Amino acid sequence: MNKAPVITIDGPSATGKGTIASRVARRLGYRLLDSGALYRVLALAAHERGVDLDDGTAIAALAPRLDIAFPANGKATLAGRDVSTEIRTGGNDERASRVAALPEVRQILLPVQHGFRKPPGLVAEGRDMGEVVFPDARCKFFLTASAEIRARRRHKQLIGKGLDARLPGLLRDLRSRDRRDEQRSISPSRPASGAVEIDTSELTIDQVVDRVMGVITAN
Ligand code: C5P
């Protein structure tokens, strides 16, 4: 069977992954999977229903019952309700990373993620896209940047949306989330084998997109 081509873009949060994946998808005319948004919506739904965030069985049982949709890039709905901002604020970063550390949850979300792979192709972004979810991807990337630079980017993003944000708290949260994502026993965040690593600390979004497109075109 000829499967639709996949480009994977992994890396820690605030490396510009989301914006870069979305631009690369647009240039290629491919679909986009923001896998972090799946974990984020599931975490929000579990929290709202009072489900214990460490109970993998209960959260995995909740997942198939949810009506989650991504009507546009950066938008997410839960049973028709726009939760795009809620999933990225008010402690939901932390919740998503806790829920994502549960093996039952990762297992149940695997076929959901595979379902995004449709012609003409898919750009998938997250932590384990290249290593676990789409190991046969055509090109794999791993984006990095220093924690300080990532915290500053996140700060600018939140302030730009008119939300309250403090740099020291953001940096602390980011580091604790990095630690959990990198040290968990299942699908820890690290470069997939064969991934092209790009340090985005000193690069603009356009420069990263150009590098990614350069590698894709050459392969
Ligand atoms: O990418 P984003 O910051 O939106 O992801 C939110 C959380 O979901 C991350 O902290 C990580 O724990 C988890 N995640 C994951 N695997 C993915 C994507 C996200 O574990 N493929």
Image (cartoon, rainbow, N blue to C red):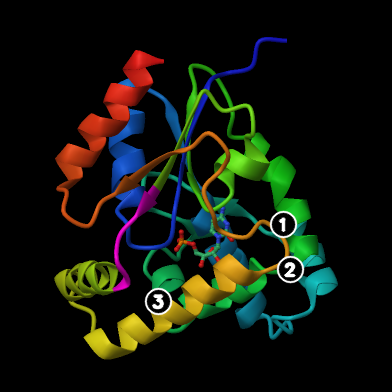
Question: Mark 3 sits on what residue?
Answer: 174
Residue 123 circle label: none
Taking the image as shown, residue 141 lies to the left or right of residue 138, namely left
Pointer 3 with pointer 2, Cβ within 8 A: no
Q: Is mark 3 within 8 Å of ligand 1?
A: no
Q: Earlier in the sequence, mark 3 or mark 2?
A: 2
Q: Quadrant of residue 85?
A: bottom left
User: Which residues lie in the magenta part?
Assistant: 143-147
The nearer-to-camera label among 3 and 1 is: 3
Where is 48 relative to 72, above or below? below
Q: Position of residue 31 (x, y in %)?
A: 45, 30
Report how far apart the C-alphas of labels 3 and 2 lie in the structure: 19 Å
- Within 10 Å of disc 2 (Cα), the crowding (few <14, some 14-19, many 20+) is many
Residue 106 circle label: 1
Foreground pick, 7 / 48: 7
Q: Earlier in the sequence, mark 3 or mark 1?
A: 1
Where is 119 relative to 31, above or below? above
**Residue 124, visible in the rendered structure:** yes
Q: Secondary structure at mark 3?
A: helix
Question: Mark 2 sits on what residue?
Answer: 102
Q: Secondary structure at mark 1?
A: helix
Q: Is mark 1 within 8 Å of ligand 1?
A: yes
Report how far apart the C-alphas of labels 1 and 2 lie in the structure: 7 Å
- Residue type (three-letter) at the residue carrying disc 2: Leu
Which image quarter is the C terminus in?
Answer: top left
Residue 144 on the magenta segment: yes
Residue at position x 66%, y 36% in the image: 114
- Residue type (three-letter) at the residue carrying disc 1: Arg
- Residue type (three-letter) at the residue carrying disc 3: Leu
- Within 10 Å of disc 3 (Cα), the crowding (few <14, some 14-19, many 20+) is many
Foreground pick, 102 / 86: 102
